[in-house]
């Protein structure tokens, strides 16, 4: 049977949105504990090069792995669209194809490990003690690539089936393990950067195992072995559609990570203190972004179902309602950061110079949630509707605007980095808003 339709009344829309957004938000907050716990624990050592090394190493692996987030996003979209049509066999085929693609990517990444590590640290501008610490971090955490990729597929499939609470349970459990390992390995055993990296490797592996057990309980997953043998699963048209969708999502994510790489590289050029302070501010932003991405998840699932069912009125109501709910949460987060962001950010380091720098630039962390909300929600709409080419093109245009603002404001020092980053999100939302009406008309033509 198809997923239950979203109610046409405002209350029905709100319940459907929050039923996905709130668990997804909590899941994403738990995910943020990976970065926040790492930065907090390594910050207790009062060693700016070690903190900077973890930041650079984490940014490198985030760049390498997050560009493959298309595995999660495309799986959400295709699963939700199949659910909207009531096709369980198709959902099984989506899972099999996505897992096979993840296996291929994991094998290629592991084979390229020496080159990726060396080239990535060079691109990020890591030097001296920071480079040594970052290299030690990457050498251990890189092995989490395979469980991360398989876990991304399983997460996307479960979310596409509205099993967001199951994903939340797994994420919370893995993060409890991660935090416990951080405290034990870094503060208890004194393993420093190696302890932080090992904690992530172990917790990612456990998370993938738990997700696999959760997915195996879903009815369509029981058809996966049969789907593996079906010719329809490996039909050229289906494989081609999957690759085109993932190609656009891959390119879009590469562009997004280019923005983050430029932000990190420009900060690294200003020394270990500014790099460490920017790392803390960025983690605060990521905490807000991951919370607001709960509304992106709601848009992916619900708009994907509406498109699969061919229900344009429901689709348009969903876009408006998700945007309103998301902006309300964004304003609340920004208010909290404005009132308490300084002390919160300063708690992530014991180095006086780092704390002083964080306090100086803390207002950017307060402004970013509101600036980024519209682009987060519209990303979910575009992914759920499989409008990935348009999303990639608007991202490219926003990147060009980001580079221009970064260049024009270079005399402002570290403020120019955060100003450019804020306007990047505004450029993204503007491009997507312009494209939205035409895409909606074309997708719902009968």
Image (cartoon, rainbow, N blue to C red):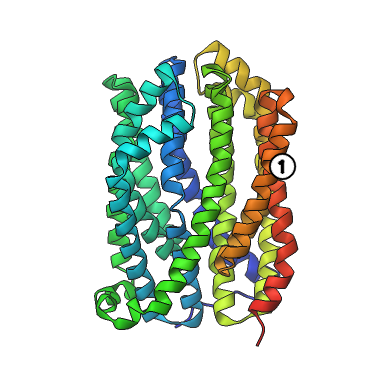
Q: Residue at x 69, y 59 (%)?
A: 432
Task: In this rendered view, identify the residue nearer to me: 66 or 33.
Answer: 66
Q: Residue at x 53, y 67 (%)?
A: 301
- Name the quarter where the C terminus is drawn: bottom right
The image quadrant that residue 155 belongs to is bottom left
Horizontal relation, residue 433 to residue 257: left or right: right
Residue 343, visible in the rendered structure:
yes
Q: Is residue 120 above or below residue 28?
A: above
Give x and y (percent) for residue 2. 48, 81
For image coordinates 36% across by 53% down, the residue present is 149
Residue at the extreme top: 352
Alpha-carbon neighbours of circle 1 within 10 Å: few (<14), some, or many (≥20)? many
Q: Is residue 246 left or right of residue 184?
A: right
Q: Examine the rendered structure and indicate whether residue 36 appears above or below residue 232.
A: above
Q: Nearer the viewer, residue 57 or 293?
A: 57
Residue 141: percent from left, percent from top: 32, 37
Residue 335 seen in the figure: no
Q: Quadrant of the N terminus?
A: bottom left
Q: Position of residue 410 (x, y in %)?
A: 71, 27
Callout 1: SS: helix
Q: Quadrant of residue 97?
A: bottom left
Residue at image coords 37%, 23%: 133
Measuring from the top left, give residue 346's x and y in whole percent. 57, 21
Q: Which residue is mark 1?
A: 423
Examine the rendered structure and indicate whether residue 123 appears above or below residue 82. above
Tally the numbered discs.
1
Q: Is residue 31 left or right of residue 418?
A: left
Compared across the picture, whether 169 is left or right of 185 comes to: right
């Amino acid at each position: 049977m198809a997923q239950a339709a979203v109610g046409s009344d405002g209350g029905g829309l709100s319940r459907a949105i929050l039923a996905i957004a709130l668990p997804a938000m909590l899941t994403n907050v738990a995910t943020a504990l990976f970065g926040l716990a790492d930065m907090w624990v390594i910050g207790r050592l009062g060693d700016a090069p070690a903190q900077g090394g973890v930041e650079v190493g984490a940014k490198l692996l985030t760049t390498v792995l997050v560009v493959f987030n298309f595995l999660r996003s495309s799986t959400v979209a295709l699963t939700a669209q199949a659910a909207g049509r009531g096709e369980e066999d198709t959902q099984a085929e989506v899972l099999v194809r996505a897992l096979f693609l993840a296996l291929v990517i994991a094998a290629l990444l592991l084979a390229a490990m020496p080159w990726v590590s060396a080239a990535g640290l060079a691109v990020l501008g890591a030097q001296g003690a920071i480079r040594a610490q970052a290299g030690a971090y990457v050498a251990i955490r890189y092995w989490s690539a395979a469980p991360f990729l398989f876990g991304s597929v399983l997460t996307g499939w479960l979310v596409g089936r509205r099993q967001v609470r199951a994903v939340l349970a797994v994420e919370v459990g893995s993060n409890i393990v991660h935090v416990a390992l951080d405290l034990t390995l870094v503060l208890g055993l004194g393993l420093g950067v190696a302890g932080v990296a090992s904690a992530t490797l172990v917790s990612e592996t456990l998370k993938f195992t738990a997700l696999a057990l959760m997915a195996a309980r879903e009815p369509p997953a029981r058809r996966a072995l049969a789907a593996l043998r079906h010719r329809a699963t490996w039909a050229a048209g289906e494989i081609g559609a999957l690759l085109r969708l993932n190609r656009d999502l891959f390119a879009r994510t590469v562009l997004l990570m280019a923005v983050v790489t430029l932000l990190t590289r420009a900060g690294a050029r200003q020394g270990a203190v500014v790099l460490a302070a920017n790392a803390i501010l960025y983690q605060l932003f990521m905490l807000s972004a991951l919370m607001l991405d709960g509304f992106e998840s709601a848009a992916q699932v619900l708009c994907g179902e509406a498109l699969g069912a061919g229900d344009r009125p429901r689709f348009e109501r969903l876009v408006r309602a998700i945007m309103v709910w998301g902006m309300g949460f964004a304003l609340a987060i920004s208010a909290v950061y404005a009132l308490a962001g300084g002390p919160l950010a300063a708690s992530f380091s014991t180095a006086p110079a780092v704390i002083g720098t964080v306090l100086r630039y803390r207002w950017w962390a307060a402004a970013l949630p509101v600036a980024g909300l519209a682009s987060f929600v519209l990303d979910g709409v575009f992914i759920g509707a499989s409008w990935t080419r348009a999303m990639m093109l608007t991202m490219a245009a926003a990147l060009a605007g980001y580079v221009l603002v970064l260049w024009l404001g270079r005399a402002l020092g570290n403020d120019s980095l955060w100003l450019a980053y804020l306007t990047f999100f505004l450029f993204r939302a503007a491009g997507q808003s312009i494209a939205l009406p035409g895409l909606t008309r074309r997708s719902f033509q009968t």
